[in-house]
Amino acid sequence: MKFGSVDKIRTVSDSKRDFYTRHTRPINSVYRRVVEELLVEMHLLSVNVDFHYDPIYALGVVTSFEKFMEGYRPGEDKPNIFNALCQAVNGNPEVYRRDAENMIAIAKETNIDSLLSQLQNPAMGGNNQLSDSLVSVINAPKFKYSRLFAIGLYTILAEAQPEMIKEKEKREQILQKFSEILHLSSEKLQKDLDVYRGNLDKMDQLLKVIEDALEAEKKKRQQKEQEKQTTPQ
């Protein structure tokens, strides 16, 4: 009996190998875990039969990368790290960036209530890339939810209605409405975003510790230089 050839499914190791082939410079240890966790998450989605790339997911990827890589040194390495990250899962970094920028631009001009009303009649379709993407989620037979999609959606809502970031009750109400319309688990969405915000806070604290340590080291070097200059030869 002869069987047809079956495409080999890429493994996490394949994607990691691809990434480090494309980005050969060492990654600061503080950020290596961030990069590898994001890479693994993107890889697992890319090999899932129910997953389909969409601009909201792209925004989640770009936002996660930019937020958690803030303060990375040397800064000029960041673009290549991002490019390698996308290419390692057969993605196009330029498309990710472009779609993320478009989502942000549309979000700034979006009224949340109007968007919700529009999504309640998905048969009518959308009128821009954002509403088109959300209508596609509603109509998808098997939409593959991901934490990165949640972050993208949260970023859009935060750009459209900045006060929701500060007001927990309002934020939860809005997320609940979108969960219902998009047929997502509200509990899962809220939990993923709570963890995301918590991790951002931890990263901010870590960056502060690093900055303080660097500043202390700088002052120590300056003090030693001054002592050398004032010490008689």
Image (spheres, rainbow, N blue to C red):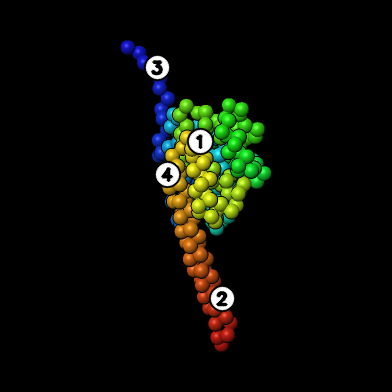
Q: Secondary structure at mark 3?
A: loop
Q: Secondary structure at mark 4?
A: helix
Measured in 3D between alpha carbons, the distance from the residue under mark 3 to the one under mark 2, in whole angstroms, is 69 Å
Q: Is residue 23 visible?
A: no
Task: Classify residue 40 as left or right of residue 117.
Answer: left
Q: Earlier in the sequence, mark 4 or mark 1?
A: 1
Crowdedness near tag 2: few (<14), some (14–19) or many (≥20) residues, C-alpha within 10 Å = few
Locate the N terminus and report the quarter of the image it occupies. top left
Q: What residue sits 57% from the left and 34% below the top?
A: 119
Q: What residue sits 65% from the left and 46% below the top?
A: 108
Q: Are marks 4 and 1 in contact (CB under 8 Å)?
A: no
Residue situated in front as seen by the camera: 79 or 108: 108
x and y percent of residue 6 in the render? 40, 22
Q: Quadrant of residue 111?
A: top right
Between tags 3 and 2, which lies in front? 3
Q: Which residue in the structure is indicated by mark 2?
A: 222
Q: Which residue in the structure is indicated by mark 3?
A: 4
Residue situated in front as seen by the camera: 56 or 188: 188
**122 lies above or below 150:** above
Q: Which amino acid, mark 3?
A: Gly
Residue situated in front as seen by the camera: 88 or 131: 131
Residue 187's label in the rendered image is 4
Q: Which residue in the structure is indicated by mark 1?
A: 182
Measured in 3D between alpha carbons, the distance from the residue under mark 1 to the one under mark 2, in whole angstroms, is 58 Å
Measured in 3D between alpha carbons, the distance from the residue under mark 3 to the one under mark 4, in whole angstroms, is 43 Å
Q: Earlier in the sequence, mark 1 or mark 3?
A: 3
Between tags 1 and 3, which lies in front? 1
Q: Earlier in the sequence, mark 1 or mark 2?
A: 1
